Amino acid sequence: MDRQRWIDELRGVAIILVIVGHVIGGVDVSIGGGETNAIREALYAFHMPLFFMISGLVTKANDTNWKSIREELKKILVALYIPYLIFGYLFWGIKYFIYMGNEKVTITDALRLPYDWSAWVPGWYLLALMGIKLVDIVVRKIKWGGAMEPHCYMEHIANY
């Protein structure tokens, strides 16, 4: 599949919406911000599902037919889990050694990072996408024995 410019542009818009939502959440309630702001809630209603849809658009429907499950798992770990760990430990180190922020982090948080998404909450998206990709492997390899068009996933999962 050739790279589609509109997908990159849509991804850029989604990134901007995430930033806007986080900024609004950090603005004091007395001047129209806060986590319960209606604009922020509207953005949060669709910007992360938009990221998942974009991820589905760029996933090849038949790119794993000939690969072993071991190769697929390695690809997922390198693409999603290792960046989750790298950025999670970087984030933890900055909070622990430089700036504590609103919440104090502990050594226990660093030890929990590999298996507990709540140890580094901003990384939830990488773990969620990894989980979806793992379900995808199971669905295609075990249940249906091959590739499925992306638009069929939800129907098959709903009927499972």
Image: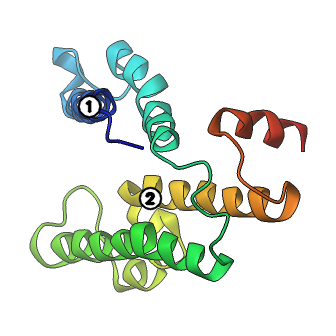
Q: Secondary structure at mark 1?
A: helix
Instruction: Give coordinates of residue 41: x percent, y percent.
Output: 41, 21
Determine the CA span between mark 2 and mark 1. 23 Å
The residue at 32%/34% (across/down) is: 4
Q: Vertical placement of 1 versus 62: above or below?
A: above
Tell me if 114 is positioned left or right of 10 in this view. right
Circle 1: residue type:
Arg
Q: Vertical placement of 30 versus 147: above or below?
A: above
**Considering depth in this image, is 100 or 59 the residue closer to the camera?**
59
The residue at 28%/31% (across/down) is: 25
Badge 2 or badge 1: first in the primary sequence = 1
| Number of marks | 2
Instruction: Give coordinates of residue 86: x percent, y percent.
Output: 30, 76
Nearest-to-viewer mark from 2 and 1:
1
Circle 2: residue type:
Leu
Q: Which residue is mark 1?
A: 5
Q: Which residue is mark 2?
A: 126
The residue at 85%/54% (across/down) is: 144
> In which quadrant will I find the C terminus?
top right
Tell me if 92 is positioned left or right of 77 in this view. left
**Considering depth in this image, is 27 or 43 the residue closer to the camera?**
43
Q: Vertical placement of 37 versus 128: above or below?
A: above
The residue at 35%/42% (across/down) is: 2
Quarter of the view holding residue 19: top left
Q: Which mark is residue 100?
A: none
